[in-house]
Image (tube, rainbow, N blue to C red):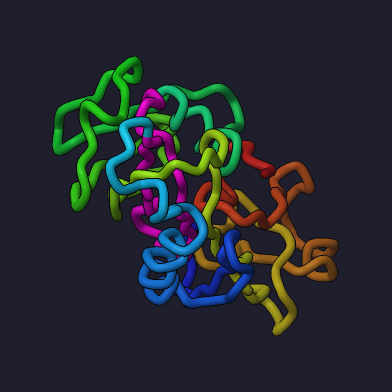
Amino acid sequence: MPRRPRITSKGTCALCKSEFGKSAMTRHLKSCIEKTLIDEKFTQGSTSLLKFFHLLVEGHHLPEYWMHLKVPSHARFEDLDNFLREIWLECCGHLSAFRIGREEVKKSKKLEYVLHPGMQLNYEYDFGSTTELLLKVVSEVKSNIKTGDLEILARNDPPQIKCSNCDHLATRICTECIYEDAGWLCDDCAEDHKCDADMLLPVVNSPRTGVCGYVG
């Protein structure tokens, strides 16, 4: 895993476009979901409500990378797996797994048969150069408003990571030097870097940045 200092992060709510820090975003979404995705006039006594989970997904060791997701309860874990790969992870078709403790969850299972508010589970992508995620079930919501499939409710803004050699923002990562805290490079420093250009990867907004061949 690339070494780097912890960075505080903010993000924008996709429902109301307001900006909040990570902790405040969780609190904000609880009320924003009620205002925008639930119509109280029709939910009381209705038998045809749609259910979805509000999930917080974050880098297990890099919590400045985070997403709040709206996931239909009838979705399967393979649907969530594909979504996480598309947004944050996919580079070389590696294997992946969801786990509750040490027990692996079958990807063919529907979320509604496994998840409940308050629980946590782990996710691993690539069992060699592994990227680990922590998933927290914030709530289960009943709504009569159809809002599509898996959606991002909020996501962290790209972390502002400084170049290892100067005060400019890093745009490249040297995969040879990153484990020595010397691999974050701005455009200018990347041109003069000692390692071959093939060792450089772009800095991207993902906990997999700088790992394997991931370019976003």
Residue 60 counted in the magenta span = yes
Count of marks overlaid on the render: 0
Q: Based on the displayed image, in which of its 4 quarters is residue 213 positioned? A: top right
Q: Residue furthest bottom?
A: 167
Q: Based on the displayed image, in which of its 4 quarters is residue 102 positioned? A: top left
Can residue 59 be seen?
no
Q: At 42% from the left edge and 34% from the top edge, which residue is drawn?
A: 72
Q: x and y percent of residue 135 in the render?
A: 32, 47
The relative height of residue 12 versus residue 70 in the rendered view (above or below) is: below
Taking depth in this image into account, of 58 and 170 the one nearest to the observer is 58
Q: Residue furthest top?
A: 108
Can residue 169 be seen?
yes
Q: x and y percent of residue 153 in the render?
A: 52, 55
Taking depth in this image into account, of 182 and 94 the one nearest to the observer is 94
Q: At 41% from the left edge and 61% from the top edge, which residue is drawn?
A: 34
Q: At 63% from the left edge and 40% from the top edge, which residue is drawn?
A: 214
Is residue 18 found left or right of 43 in the rendered image?
A: right
Taking depth in this image into account, of 168 and 82 the one nearest to the observer is 82
Taking depth in this image into account, of 216 and 150 the one nearest to the observer is 150
Quadrant placement of the C terminus: top right
The range drawn in magenta is 49-77
Q: Based on the displayed image, in which of its 4 quarters is residue 109 positioned? A: top left
The relative height of residue 207 versus residue 127 in the rendered view (above or below) is: below
Is residue 120 found left or right of 108 in the rendered image?
A: left
Q: x and y percent of residue 134 in the render?
A: 32, 49
The relative height of residue 152 versus residue 214 in the rendered view (above or below) is: below
Residue 101 counted in the magenta span = no
Q: At 48% from the left edge and 68% from the top edge, which residue is drawn?
A: 4
Q: x and y percent of residue 209 in the render?
A: 58, 51
